[in-house]
Amino acid sequence: MTVPVWAWVAVIGGLLVVLAFDLWIVDRGEPREFSMRQAGFWVGFYVTLAVIFGVGLWILAGPDPAAQFFAGYLTEYSLSVDNLFVFYIIMSRFAVPKAYQHKVLLVGVLMALVMRGVFIAVGAAALANFSWLFYFFGLFLIYTAVQLVRQHGGDDEEFTENAVLRWARRALPHTDDYVGSKIMVKVDGRRLVTPMLIVMVAIGTTDLLFALDSIPAIFGLTTDAFIVFTANAFALMGLRQLYFLLGGLLQRLVYLSYGLAFILGFIGVKLIAEALSSSGVSWAPHVPIWLSLSVIGVTMVVTTVASLVKSRRDVRKSNQITAPAEAKQV
């Protein structure tokens, strides 16, 4: 799909306006915790924006690009849910006050969006010139899927500081405590950054590491850089509010890793099959985008429902075990 420059400018400009408005809302008045009602409204708002964009793409470019966008958006959004576990660990480790968590996520995600944009541009150029990378991406996604299954049921995810974050903590003079929501303060004539900036770097760079599997995954659905970027952008923009909306629900999505593993494995096989087909292998199947979209959507619905059913059963069993013990004590 050939995308004119004005379309890129319009989309990026529109996203920046929405993010600036979001940041203005967060910064106005006294910092306060993000309520469930607010989170639900903003999640609905950003999902609606994505749907409107996809419908517009359908009208202007046709059903295939729109289906590719929705498949990519669902994939990126699904993978982002798993990332929220690590974001929660980062917030806890740095003891970020709840009133400031939304701003941390907003700026951190904005950093990630810029870095992902560079990553997508490099990836699109590389795939256009080196078709053998499709095999590499496919195998990498299958490997990631296997690792997700193997890690399921083990210890909780841990956050390990990456090289950029370690450098920031060493090189940037910083205060020991938070100073409101400020990222930089002046103490005794010396400018110091606050832990707020360090956390933002942690969120942004950690999300970039997550892109190592999410970007190849969406390139398995479409090689159009415009669709890849917009699907990533809309998924990231709704990620912050989803963090607050899901809350304790994250711990109940016990089968999420299995669902994500199946999606990554499916896209990995699809990548390899289409690479073989483009190389002239007649028996290699072609997976239409509508089938990819259906598989991704059904997988996430089944995974979510099965997780919630199992969590509910576990709660009932726990209550049945504790009830007799409490009765004996009485």
Image: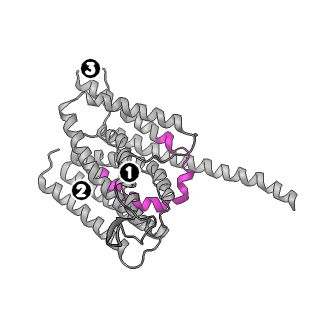
Main SS, magenta region, reads helix
Question: Which amino acid, mark 1?
Answer: Leu
The residue at the point 46 percent across, 66 percent down is: 177
Q: Earlier in the sequence, mark 2 or mark 3?
A: 2
Dot in front, 3 or 1: 1
Q: Earlier in the sequence, mark 3 or mark 1?
A: 1
Q: Taking 96 as reference, is 170 above or below it?
A: above
Percent position of residue 186, x then y: 34, 71
The residue at the point 32 percent across, 53 percent down is: 112
| Foreground residue among 9 and 304 | 9
From the image, tell me which residue sits under label 3. Answer: 281
User: Count the marks: how many?
Assistant: 3
Percent position of residue 298, x then y: 45, 44
Q: Taking 133 as reference, is 322 above or below it?
A: below
| Foreground residue among 200 and 128 | 200
Question: Which amino acid, mark 2?
Answer: Gly
Percent position of residue 16, x then y: 25, 63
> How many angstroms separate mark 2 from mark 3 (CA)?
36 Å
- Left or right: where does residue 77 sit relative to residue 282? right
Q: Taking 199 as reference, is 131 above or below it?
A: above
Q: Verify whether residue 235 appears in magenta.
A: yes
Q: Which mark is residue 165?
A: 1
- Left or right: where does residue 197 sit relative to residue 317? left
Query: In the rendered structure, which segment of residues is drawn in magenta?
Result: 232-259
Label 2: few (<14), some or many (≥20) within 10 Å? few
> How many angstroms separate mark 3 from mark 1 (CA)?
46 Å
* Residue 126 placement: quadrant: top left
Is the Cβ of the residue at disc 3 closer than 8 Å to that at disc 1? no
- In this rendering, does residue 63 appear at all? no
Colour scheme shown: one colour
The residue at the point 34 percent across, 61 percent down is: 107
